[in-house]
Amino acid sequence: MPSSPTTGAPVLSAPRRAILGWILFDPACQPYFTLITTFIFAPYFASAVAPTPADGQALWGFATGAAGLVIALCSPVLGAVADAAGRRKPWIAVFGLMLMAGAAGLWFAAPGDTARIPFVLAAFAVGTIGVEFATVFNNAIMPSLAPPERLGRLSGTGWAAGYFGGLVSLALMLAFFSTQPDTGLTLLGRPPAFGLEAAAREGDRFSGPFTALWFAVLVLPMFLFVPDAPAAMPMRAAIKAGVAEIRALLPKLKARPVLARFLLANMVYADGLVALFAFGGIYAAGTFGWGSIEIGIFGIALTLTGTAGALAGGWLDDALGPRVVILAALVALLVACLGLLSLDRDAVLFGLVPTAPGAGGLFGSLPEKAYVGFGLLIGLVAGPLQAASRTLLVRLAPRENMAECFGLFALSGKITSFAAPTSVAVVTAATGSQKAGVAVLLAFFTLGAVLVAGVRDRTR
């Protein structure tokens, strides 16, 4: 009988309602990333709350970097606590309340009210820390719900449900709440629901409370139906175990230089990818003046191409090997980033080719169409990049230390999660240019590609 990787106890398939409750956690959290971090609130903040779009990009980057630093410093210890302390639901409740409080606080981001910017950014940082840490403890429940040979299916179902939850929440926001700044109407051509004032951009601001309510509803089955482990190691002992684990990382990596090189590469390009998604909507709002409707429709298309790319990437991974897929994806990201940076509102190719005004309508001008095309390319390769990274780790890691290496892999994706957003923020603030800030990400993808190019897959 299979046993739990964390407790050693026998694992039987959990009841369906428990599995469903656990799966619903992903779509419960996803609107925080879809609505707030990427497609609705972040562009609104940069274009309507901050003094200028460049200031908004810099401020958002500093807040994202600060939250990332806290996550990087605390996630290894909390991961050990999740494994050793036993009970996970109380921690999910605490961090879930942080998510809800932070998201709800974004309602107070009134247009042009710069006095509230520190409060709004603090609320965003608190919510970001909450959603990331709640996910750590929810992930720790997974091994107790299914035997090892079915964990991949369970994890993949949760991931897919999260994508679907993000799409549904984004569609609802566009249809009933978010409005075009010039018309005050939603995608359905109506005023925002519940009597929200379009002039005060209350539809866009509602993305915060909407995210909090969405989480509160969808997370309930997890608390009601998913069994929690009994208390195990005392909290102080669990924290000590986490600190000891961090201290032991460096010697382990010195003994495995190829694995260490790949983990370093993953740390660099994963950080760049997170920042690229975080600033994509903000950059579009500043460059083209896109409102929530344009950015939201762009986000739906990006998610759909991401799903298609992830499916196609699996076939390419099996045929060509994960290292080739990773390198190809990084080259595509470099091309897409250069393409995005080459666009202005009235020109392409870094101003060398002026363009005529758009014919009106959605994405009417040539630069806007090009932006959508490059964005869809990013969505197409982001999924294969992340999936192939996990596959390459399996090929590089010793089988007897697989679980430990996946822990290092997860840590490498978090430990510098503040670096790229902070770099974008610093350069944007220093230059007053959104383009200069986003251009920093080219260095992350280039360095990641150089590091991966030196990794030799032992099976090919």
Image (spheres, rainbow, N blue to C red):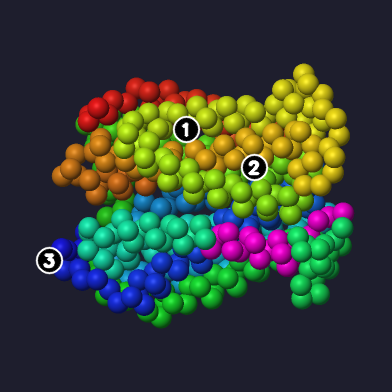
Q: Is residue 26 magenta?
A: no
Q: Which residue is mark 3?
A: 1
Residue drawn where x is 45% and y is 69% of the image: 24
* View extreme (top): residue: 352
* Secondary structure type for disc 2: helix
In what quadrant of the picture does the N terminus appear? bottom left
Q: Please determine whether, in this image, residue 59 is positioned above or below residue 353.
A: below
Q: Amino acid at mark 1?
A: Ala
Residue drawn where x is 28% and y is 33% of the image: 259
Query: Mark 3 vs mark 1: which is more N-terminal?
Result: 3
Q: In this image, 274 relative to 1: left or right?
A: right
Q: Which residue is mark 2?
A: 280
From the viewer's side, name the closer residue of 284 and 57: 284
Q: Quadrant of residue 159?
A: bottom left
Q: Amino acid at mark 3?
A: Met
Query: Mark 1 vs mark 2: which is more N-terminal?
Result: 2
Q: Please determine whether, in this image, residue 137 is positioned above or below residue 369.
A: below
Q: Quadrant of residue 396?
A: top left
How many other residues sit within 10 Å of disc 1, few (<14), some (14-19) or many (≥20)?
many
Instruction: Give the numbered dot on residue 329.
Output: 1
Whether tag 1 and tag 2 are in contact, CB under 8 A, the answer is no
Instruction: Give the numbered dot on residue 145.
Output: none
Q: Which residues are magenta?
A: 165-182
Give the percent coordinates (x, y) of residue 400: 15, 44
* Secondary structure type for disc 3: loop
